[in-house]
Image: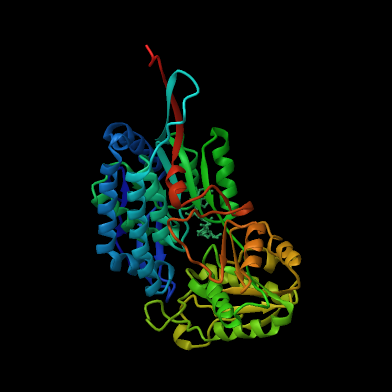
């Protein structure tokens, strides 16, 4: 079956991509969702130039903030109106369950609304003068922002970049993941239809080549990237010669810690959903389970039982808790790590295989998996798998735990389960992670800054800082006021 190539958003027009064709597959059965042609390098150049022109000529960043906010509020309304279409497309492209995609479509609208509100309420600063002048601190856009997003949550990740970057007065050129291009184009359509000046937003399908061309384009003023740590490092290196500011939201290998005094049932449920939700394809997935030794066996058994109770099935089936992996390639990667764990002496306590239901044989399915018996130095304990694979390890005391929790290159998130809130607070302050959850996991508010320590990233998205990340600060001194 062939399908007409989906147009891309380039400089205010919906037009065919001039690069090679991308075939987008539904991981439920490998069927064709659609095709789109990648942007050519000339189109990358045209998008950046159009963005720069739109910033200069449309007066977007000089518009009063409540007028910029009007456009964003309208985009949020359109996302709500189109939520079902957006959710359906995201599910088709990356296999997330439809109920999760619906939640994310609504969340994307909430993100856009939040940044509209921040845009019109954010205050500046007038520092107390230390001489005969008035000093004012202003915040100005970078010009054209290059934004790159991964495939796991394109609706929320896309909204999280487009809304603050535009609210801050910039133009944006978005390069979504090759796997989730169609939903990213539809998200952008809501902004375009909301009355954003033409040229201010372009969406360029493609892979690494398009991304590299974008980051190294001399017209780009700032880079905002969410994806893997290795890619983030390459982007930071490409941005360095021009001192381009970068926001990098990268990978993780987050610890989820159960102390002996925790509510063990709640902890086991929380641990299971922290790793198996979205099939583990979440940057904050709680992929390393540390259990205090006296309760180790009982907690691991309960987590295994909670994982076994999850229903793996078609993404559109309301009874499915977990859909297929986002791609067959991602399943192969997960399988490779489980083989490695077996080779490293790990015991597979749950899963470690594709489901044996013949009805699921054509999709990229993989069962929730729990492994123990590995050394913490093993690759499976150290490397991000990005799938529903949990490694379990015992610990003894607080110092031992903090050392283990911090013993990877990552520092994105950490979960703590205990009834002793003083201990929770102590450990929360000690661990090197950008987000810590106590007796909960994966609560993510757009109002709270989000980002990583160590190799999990640089800079913060969300919250008030999430808008300021897209602005540069200027101090203006006005003298001669006394006479
Ligand atoms: P990836 O790094 O392979 O790709 C991310 C994006 O970068 C894609 O759009 C890709 O085409 C593009 N890209 C690849 N090479 C590039 C280059 N040299 N220059 C510019 N762009 C380039 O990541 P992925 O496989 O799509 O997503 C999974 C990763 O994303 C995981 O590591 C996950 O932890 C991470 N992630 C992080 C967060 C966070 O907020 N910290 C959120 C979601 C996902």
Lateral position of residue 162 relative to residue 427, left or right: left
The quarter of the rendered structure image containing the C terminus is top left
Write down the quadrant of residue 179 in the picture. Answer: bottom left
Q: Can residue 274 be seen in the rendering of this structure? A: yes
**Closer to the camera in the image, 351 or 449:** 449
Q: At which x and y percent is residue 266?
A: 55, 79
| Residue farthest to the top, as pictured | 483
Lateral position of residue 109 relative to residue 274, left or right: left
* Residue at the spot 42% in from the left edge and 46% down from the top edge: 467
Colour pattern: rainbow
Number of numbered discs present? 0
Write down the quadrant of residue 401 in the picture. Answer: bottom right
* Residue at the spot 38% in from the left edge and 65% down from the top edge: 104
The quarter of the rendered structure image containing the N terminus is bottom left
* Residue at the spot 32% in from the left edge and 66% down from the top edge: 2
Q: At which x and y percent is residue 233?
A: 60, 48
Q: Can residue 203 be seen in the rendering of this structure? A: no
Q: At which x and y percent is residue 370?
A: 63, 79
In the depicted structure, whether residue 433 falls above or below residue 326: above
In the depicted structure, whether residue 33 falls above or below residue 245: below
**Closer to the camera in the image, 436 or 243:** 436
In the depicted structure, whether residue 206 falls above or below residue 130: below
């Amino acid at each position: 079956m062939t399908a007409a190539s989906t147009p891309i958003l380039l400089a205010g027009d919906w037009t065919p991509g001039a690069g090679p064709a991308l075939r987008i597959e539904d991981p439920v059965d490998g069927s064709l969702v659609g095709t789109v042609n990648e942007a050519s390098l000339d189109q990358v150049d045209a998008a950046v130039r159009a963005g720069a022109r739109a910033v200069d000529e449309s007066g977007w960043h000089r518009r009063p903030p409540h007028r910029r906010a009007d456009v964003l509020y309208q985009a949020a309304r359109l996302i709500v109106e189109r939520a079902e279409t957006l959710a359906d497309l995201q599910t088709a492209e990356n296999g997330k369950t439809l109920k999760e995609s619906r939640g994310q479509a609504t969340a994307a609208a909430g993100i856009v609304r939040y940044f509209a509100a921040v845009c019109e309420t954010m205050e500046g600063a007038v520092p107390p003068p230390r001489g005969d002048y008035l000093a004012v601190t202003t915040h100005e856009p970078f010009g054209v922002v290059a934004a790159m997003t991964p495939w796991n949550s394109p609706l929320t990740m896309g909204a999280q970049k487009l809304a603050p970057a535009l609210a801050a007065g910039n133009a944006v050129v978005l390069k979504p993941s090759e796997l989730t291009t169609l939903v990213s184009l539809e998200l952008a359509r809501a902004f375009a239809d909301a009355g954003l000046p033409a040229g201010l937003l372009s969406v360029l399908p493609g892979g690494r080549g398009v991304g590299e061309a974008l980051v190294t384009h001399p017209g780009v003023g700032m880079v905002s990237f969410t994806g893997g740590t290795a890619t983030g490092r390459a982007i930071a290196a490409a941005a360095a010669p021009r001192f381009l500011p970068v926001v990098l939201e990268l990978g993780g290998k987050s610890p989820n810690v159960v102390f002996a005094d925790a509510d063990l049932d709640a902890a086991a449920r929380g641990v299971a959903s922290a790793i198996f939700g979205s099939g583990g394809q979440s940057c904050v997935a709680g992929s390393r389970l540390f259990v205090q030794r006296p309760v180790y066996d009982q907690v691991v058994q309960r987590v295994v039982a909670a994982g076994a109770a999850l229903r793996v099935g078609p993404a559109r089936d309301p009874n499915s808790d977990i859909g297929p992996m986002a791609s067959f390639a991602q399943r192969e990667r997960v399988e490779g790590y489980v083989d490695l764990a077996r080779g490293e002496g790990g015991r597979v306590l749950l899963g470690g295989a594709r489901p044996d239901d013949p009805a699921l044989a054509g999709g990229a399915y993989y069962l929730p998996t729990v492994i123990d018996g590995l050394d913490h130095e093993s690759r499976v304990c150290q490397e991000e798998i990005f799938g529903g694979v949990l490694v379990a390890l015992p610990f003894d005391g607080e110092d031992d735990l903090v050392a283990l929790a911090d013993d990877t290159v990552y520092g994105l998130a950490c979960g703590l389960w205990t009834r002793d809130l003083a201990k929770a607070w102590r450990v929360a302050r000690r661990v090197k992670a950008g987000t810590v959850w106590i007796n909960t996991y994966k609560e993510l508010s757009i109002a709270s800054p989000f980002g990583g320590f160590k190799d999990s990233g640089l800079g913060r998205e969300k919250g008030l800082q999430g808008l300021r990340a897209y602005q540069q600060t200027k101090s203006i001194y006005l003298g001669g006021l006394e006479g």
